[in-house]
Amino acid sequence: MKSEAIHVDKYTISYTYRKGKKPLTILLIHGLDASKDLWQLIYNIKELVDYSILVPYLIGYGDSKAPQGFHYTMREQAESLKMLIEAIDAKSNLFFILHSMGGLIGVILAEPRSTYKGDNYCGG
């Protein structure tokens, strides 16, 4: 998959995204000493071909640049991912697959928020 970058708020976020036919997005969040490349084999799994797959680089990794004053907290990482999810309109029916530090970021991202009411989250 080819990487893309999007500018949202103060962030430039690099990601790969494949839009599927089914109304579920699989969000894969890498850990501290990893990258989005950790998940590249998922695109070849035939059972997942109908699902949308979103694989971002966390801020400060790869081409996702850290803005001035970014503190690398898990909450800041989760907020940047929330902005990415909303910008590409992938916020309904998210299924998380998380690695290492990405696990904590995913838990924070899945916290109930008024802007996410009605959406479904499931973690893996």
Image (tube, rainbow, N blue to C red):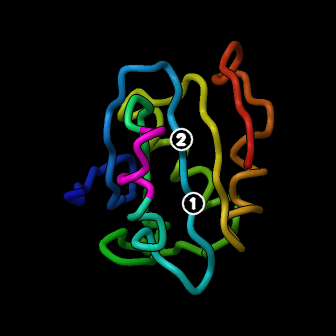
Point 78% across, 51% down: residue: 107
- Magenta stretch, main secondary structure, is helix
Q: Residues within 10 Å of mark 2 (few under 14, many from 20)?
A: many
Q: On the rendered image, what quadrant is the N terminus found in? A: bottom left
The amino acid type found where label 2 is placed reads Ile
Looking at the picture, does residue 118 appear above or below residue 46?
above
Q: In the rendering, at what x and y percent does residue 6 appear?
A: 27, 50
Q: Is residue 62 above or below residue 122?
A: below
Q: Which of 113 and 90 lies nearest the eye of the viewer?
A: 90
Residue at image position (71%, 73%) is 100
Instruction: Answer with the quarter of the image where residue 110 lies.
Output: top right
Q: Which mark is on residue 29?
A: 1
Which label belongs to residue 26? 2
Q: Residues within 10 Å of mark 1 (few under 14, many from 20)?
A: many
Mark carried by residue 101? none
Identity of the amino acid at label 1?
Answer: Ile
Residue 14 on image: x %, y %: 32, 61
In this view, the residue in front, 58 or 30, is 30
Q: Secondary structure at mark 2?
A: strand
- Give, as a single range, the part of the protein colored magenta: 42-48
Q: 39 or 107, which lies in front?
A: 39
User: How many numbered marks does the figure carry?
Assistant: 2
Q: Give the residue furthest to the front.
A: 46
Q: Is residue 31 above or below residue 113?
A: below
Asked whether 43 falls inside the magenta stretch, the response is: yes
Residue 66 is situated, as x and y percent measured from the top left of the image, at 42, 73
Coordinates of residue 67 in the picture (x, y in percent): 41, 70
Left or right position of 114 against 93: right
Q: Taking 91 as reference, is 56 above or below it?
A: below
Distance, label 1 to label 2, CA atoms, is: 10 Å
Residue shown at the point (73%, 36%) measured from the top left: 122
Badge 1 marks a residue whose secondary structure is strand
